[in-house]
């Protein structure tokens, strides 16, 4: 136990930088929810931004409908969403004071918890629910370590979506771009026609947004196999023309990005588009909730969306929000009931519709979504599950290397230097043993 606690304490700062999964840091009250019951469920989550708070309420309403005797103790320690919430959670775990369950992403973040002995394997629950039969194979792999599932995913977020001001595009007679050349042309057109408007909104305050944009450029430049190889540390970037090309393209895009991007969070960048101060933003499915809840924009009317890029083929970069059960869960029976509800259509339909993600279950009718954007995306995922690859949130990169990579991308945006950036990436691969640490990931 001392060794495990030491591991958590020494890794606390690095792990706290692991992405909040699409949310701005906001305060929590730390108070339990109002409903009463004979069982308690102590849960940590970071859904506090517009569209996310409402989705959390939908989750707990679904739990209450199925198990009215379970009392939810929501975010019992103050600390806020995302990064801050993780600090509180991981401090408690290091001290041996475990909650029942907590929100985590798939991929490298989940692997950190599993390697540290924090989560129970859920093989029996998955077998009971036959859950692997109703979700895409790449999603099941993203939430499993050494073949054992440790969490239940409730959604799939698609990272590489380009949102745009639909009436503006119609006014200017332009089509949404699906590759980098088209993106530059569209940005030039918007800048010429609307000089006071930023063609592309970006929120770099937490730095991961910079890596999001670059991911799409890299995916087009190298294709899906290359994308995976890069994040597994299998590419020698110092001698690789593809990575250099992607950085050079990224630099070409800088003049079309809002100048205050380093001071904004992701939802504030979405808000720029909603306030008609920017024309486009590249963000995940959760931006749909921010548009509808934060800007009162209607999809298909006020804004449109396309996955970006769609060349050389249409690949969806994704990550899931998930919940598991800690090894010292104070209320294991209530926790297992909670996980059964997380896997159910009764929770996923209202929650994912509200928050902006896709359903984890591909047996749910895509027309449950009210907007054409997610109806099309859910159908595509159902029919092409092999087109899913872990993104910057779910992360193929180990959790120790991920924030370093964000720093490198943020530095490049501030002071673009291709050679210096390539060397920094090469050093990161070596310093954090990326090739060995990311060998667990298999695609598709």
Image (spheres, rainbow, N blue to C red):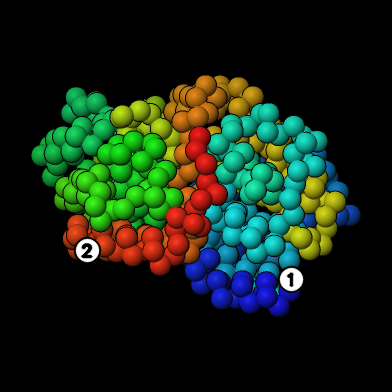
Q: Residue furthest right?
A: 38
Q: Is residue 31 above or below residue 268?
A: below
Provide residue 125's location: percent of width, then percent of height: 78, 41
Of residue 348 and residue 419, the one placed in the foreground of this image is: 419
Q: Residue at x 64, y 24 (%)?
A: 363
Residue linked to disc 1: 97
Residue linked to disc 2: 420
Q: Quick one: SS at disc 2?
A: helix
Q: Is residue 190 above or below residue 146?
A: above
User: Mark 1 or mark 2, which has the lower sequence index?
Assistant: 1
Q: Quick one: SS at disc 1?
A: loop
Q: Residue at x 56, y 76 (%)?
A: 10
Residue 67 placement, left or right of 262: right
**Quarter of the figure that contains the N terminus:** bottom right
Of residue 285 and residue 118, the one placed in the foreground of this image is: 118
Q: Residue at x 48, y 64 (%)?
A: 400
Provide residue 330's location: percent of width, then percent of height: 82, 62
């Amino acid at each position: 136990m001392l060794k495990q606690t030491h591991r958590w304490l020494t890794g606390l700062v690095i792990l706290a930088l692991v992405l909040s999964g699409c949310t701005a840091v906001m305060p929590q009250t730390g108070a339990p929810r109002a409903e009463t019951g004979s069982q308690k469920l102590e849960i940590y989550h970071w859904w506090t931004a517009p569209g996310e708070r409402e989705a959390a309420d939908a989750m707990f309403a679904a739990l209450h409908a199925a198990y009215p005797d379970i009392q939810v103790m929501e975010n019992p320690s103050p600390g806020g969403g995302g990064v801050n919430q993780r600090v509180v959670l991981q401090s408690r775990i290091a001290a041996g004071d475990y909650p029942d369950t907590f929100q985590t992403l798939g991929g490298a973040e989940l692997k950190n918890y599993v390697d540290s002995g924090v989560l129970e394997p859920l093989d029996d629950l998955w077998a009971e629910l036959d859950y692997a039969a109703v979700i895409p194979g790449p999603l099941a792999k993203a939430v499993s370590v050494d073949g054992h599932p440790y969490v239940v995913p409730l959604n799939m977020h698609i990272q590489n979506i380009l949102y745009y001001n639909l009436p503006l595009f119609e006014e200017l007679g332009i089509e949404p771009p699906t590759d980098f050349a088209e993106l530059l042309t569209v940005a030039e057109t918007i800048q010429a026609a609307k000089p006071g408007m930023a063609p592309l909104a970006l929120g770099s305050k937490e730095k991961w947004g910079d890596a999001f944009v670059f991911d799409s450029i890299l995916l087009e430049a190298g294709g899906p196999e290359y994308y995976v190889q890069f994040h597994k540390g299998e590419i020698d970037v110092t001698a690789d023309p593809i990575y250099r090309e992607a950085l050079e393209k990224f630099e070409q895009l800088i003049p079309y990005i809002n100048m205050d991007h380093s001071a904004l969070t992701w939802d504030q960048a979405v808000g720029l588009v909603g306030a008609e101060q920017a024309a486009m933003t590249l963000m995940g499915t959760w931006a749909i909730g921010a548009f509808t809840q934060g800007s009162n924009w209607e999809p298909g009317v006020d804004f449109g969306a396309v996955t970006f890029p769609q060349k050389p083929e249409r690949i969806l970069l994704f990550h899931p929000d998930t919940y598991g059960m800690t090894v010292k869960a104070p209320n294991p029976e209530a926790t297992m009931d909670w996980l059964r509800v997380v896997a159910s259509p009764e929770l996923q339909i209202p929650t994912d519709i509200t928050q902006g993600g896709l359903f984890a279950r591909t047996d749910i009718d895509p027309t449950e979504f009210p907007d054409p954007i997610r109806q099309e995306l859910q159908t595509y995922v159902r029919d092409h599950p092999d087109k899913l690859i872990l993104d910057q949130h779910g992360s193929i990169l180990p959790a120790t290397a991920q924030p370093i990579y964000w720093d490198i991308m943020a530095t490049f945006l501030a002071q673009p230097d291709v050679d210096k950036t390539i060397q920094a990436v090469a050093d990161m691969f070596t310093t954090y043993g990326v090739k060995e640490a990311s060998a667990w990931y298999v695609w598709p």
